[in-house]
Amino acid sequence: MPNARPRIAFIGFGEAGQAIAAGLRDEGVERQSAWDILFPQSAGEKLRQAAAVIGVRCANSAADAVREADIIISAVTAASSVEAAQSIKSHLAGTPYVLDINSVSPGRKQQTAKLLGDRARYVDVAVLAPIHPALHKTPMLIAGADIEALAATLAALGMRLSNAGAEIGAAAAIKMVRSVMIKGIEALTLECFLAAARAGVIDEVAASMNNNYPGLDWGKIVPYNLERMASHGERRAAEMEEVADTLRELGVEPLMTMATVKRQREMGQIGTQQPVRAVLKDDRTAMLRAISAAARGGH
């Protein structure tokens, strides 16, 4: 694999794929291709336009995308991660690296690695922060065998990678377990402050939390968490289902996690409504007012 400017292919070209591709393009990586199952559909027009702006070649198929690629980045929905690997398996040449950045359980990562076998050098990748604004420089964990050369190549392109070890699933385990807290707090924020809005005590509840968490700015945390759920709740719910599978693999009953799935999915659906989308950049009071109205309308 050329150290300086590898040939990169994306399977799945949504938010994460676009962000990473844009960042790498700025680093001088010109040979990039992508395939997304939405490309042939009208719903894929925005994805194709994004690829054109970034300078990524829109492939005609998964096979076309990965042809001659040194590095393949799988960035699909959680439910489609194994299917994505299956779509490229027979078209791989030269044992390219396959970076699986999908938010799935360690067991799913191990299943995918086994599926690809010696056709690829599989790498378990966990993205540890929102992909914007850092793009390809967003902190990531990587796990897998013989990844030192890959890590050096990607670090030279500005990527911030930490080695989680040789065992596939090690990076995913960290990502999945931390999501219990990260996305659980988001769900609790919605439940707590939706009730506060209906009781007319938003400011009072937020102020009282400073007694317990003096280092946190709830004036910023509440609208941030609400916006993330409204914009990405459906995807977060799917990820939390993978988190639940991870906990079950570890022998922990996912009671709180399954409740988080329900809240995230509910908020994702609410977030599609125009009155809610219109206030996602406003203050928490306006956001909660719109969310409350939308939630009442759904019952």
Image: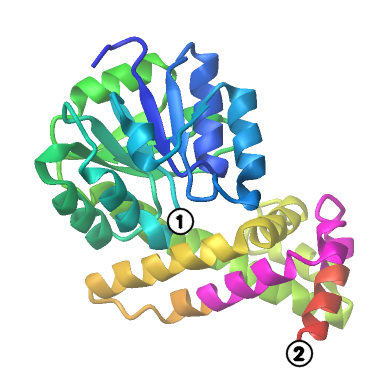
The residue lying toward the viewer, choosing from 174 and 299, is: 299
Q: Amino acid at mark 1?
A: Thr
Numbered-mark total: 2
**Residue drawn at (68%, 70%), measured in percent from left and top?**
269
Could you tell me which secondary element the residue under label 1 belongs to? loop
| Residue 275 lies in the magenta-colored region | yes
What color scheme is it? rainbow
Q: Amino acid at mark 2?
A: His
**Residue drawn at (64%, 52%), measured in percent from left and top?**
43
**Residue drawn at (89%, 62%), measured in percent from left and top?**
286
Q: Which residues are magenta?
A: 260-288
- Are circles 1 and 2 on residues that touch, CB within 8 Å? no
| Residue 275 located left or right of residue 65 | right
The residue lying toward the viewer, choosing from 160 and 118, is: 118
| Residue 138 located left or right of residue 232 | left
- Residue sitting at the far bottom: 299
The percent position of residue 4, horizontal first and vertical second, equals 34, 9
Magenta stretch: helix, strand or loop mostly: helix
The percent position of residue 219, horizontal first and vertical second, equals 78, 54
Compute the Cα span from label 1 to label 2.
29 Å
Q: Is residue 5 above or below residue 260?
A: above
Q: Which mark is residue 299?
A: 2
Which residue matches tag 1? 77
The residue lying toward the viewer, choosing from 89 and 197, is: 89
Q: Which mark is residue 16?
A: none
* Label 2 environment density (alpha carbons within 10 Å; few <14, some 14–19, many ≥20): few
| Residue 192 located left or right of residue 77 | right
**Residue drawn at (46%, 44%), measured in percent from left and top?**
12
Q: Is residue 210 above or below residue 56?
A: below
The percent position of residue 100, horizontal first and vertical second, equals 33, 44
Quadrant assignment, res 81: bottom left
